[in-house]
Image (spheres, rainbow, N blue to C red):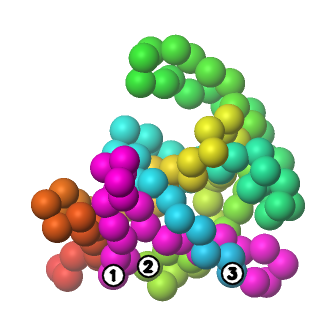
């Protein structure tokens, strides 16, 4: 299970691990239920992680605007598992975790307690 917090901006935030040269770097990521990809990182973070460019893809933003973004190959530690992920370059300073990384998990956000839980349901 991953535990996080609802921050002062009312964003659900969890820590994820990004792999670089065999080491895991923990960073905060905003859970974005409107984003269906894996992960969005800022240019500075992508450069610091020295991620490998994969391809260019088109994405639709919440306002309907279509944008073209660079996609990089990355690895993340998420809920105790190491995943090969697509990392989308963003102009935002926020790291965003999307639905693709959480597709096998249950997300619970409690705004009154300011808690976030992401867990794999027992089947």
Sooner in the amino-acid sequence: mark 1 or mark 3: 1
Which label sits on residue 93?
A: none
Which residue is drawn at the image coordinates 13% and 60% (left, top)? Answer: 112
Q: Indicate left or right for 48 with 29 as reference.
A: right
* Element type at mark 1: loop
Q: Cβ–Cβ below 8 Å for labels 1 and 2?
A: yes
Q: Look at the image and give the residue range highlighted in magenta.
A: 1-23
Q: Which residue is mark 1?
A: 1
Asked if the magenta segment contains residue 8, the reply would be yes
* Element type at mark 3: strand
Which label sits on residue 24?
A: 3
Residue 75 position in % (x across, y down): 67, 68
- Report, in whole angstroms, how far the alpha carbon at label 2 lies from the one at label 3: 13 Å
The quadrant of the image that shows the N terminus is: bottom left
Residue 52 position in % (x across, y down): 84, 55
Q: Indicate left or right for 64 with 52 as reference.
A: left
Number of residues whose C-alpha sits closer than 10 Å to that of mark 2, classed few (under 14), some (14–19) or many (20 or more): some
Which residue is drawn at the image coordinates 36% and 58% (left, top)? Answer: 7
Q: Which residue is mark 2?
A: 79
Which residue is drawn at the image coordinates 77% and 45% (left, top)? Answer: 43
């Amino acid at each position: 299970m991953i535990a996080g917090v609802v921050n002062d901006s009312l964003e659900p935030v969890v820590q994820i691990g990004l792999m670089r040269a065999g080491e895991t770097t923990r960073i905060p990521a905003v859970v974005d239920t409107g984003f269906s990809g894996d992960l969005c990182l800022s240019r500075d973070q992508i450069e610091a992680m020295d991620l490998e460019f994969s391809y260019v893809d088109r994405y639709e933003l919440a306002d309907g605007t279509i944008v073209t973004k660079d996609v990089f190959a990355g690895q993340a530690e998420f809920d105790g598992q190491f995943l090969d992920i697509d990392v989308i370059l963003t102009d935002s300073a926020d790291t965003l975790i999307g639905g693709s990384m959480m597709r096998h998990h249950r997300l619970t956000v409690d705004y009154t307690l300011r808690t976030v839980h992401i867990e794999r349901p027992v089947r």
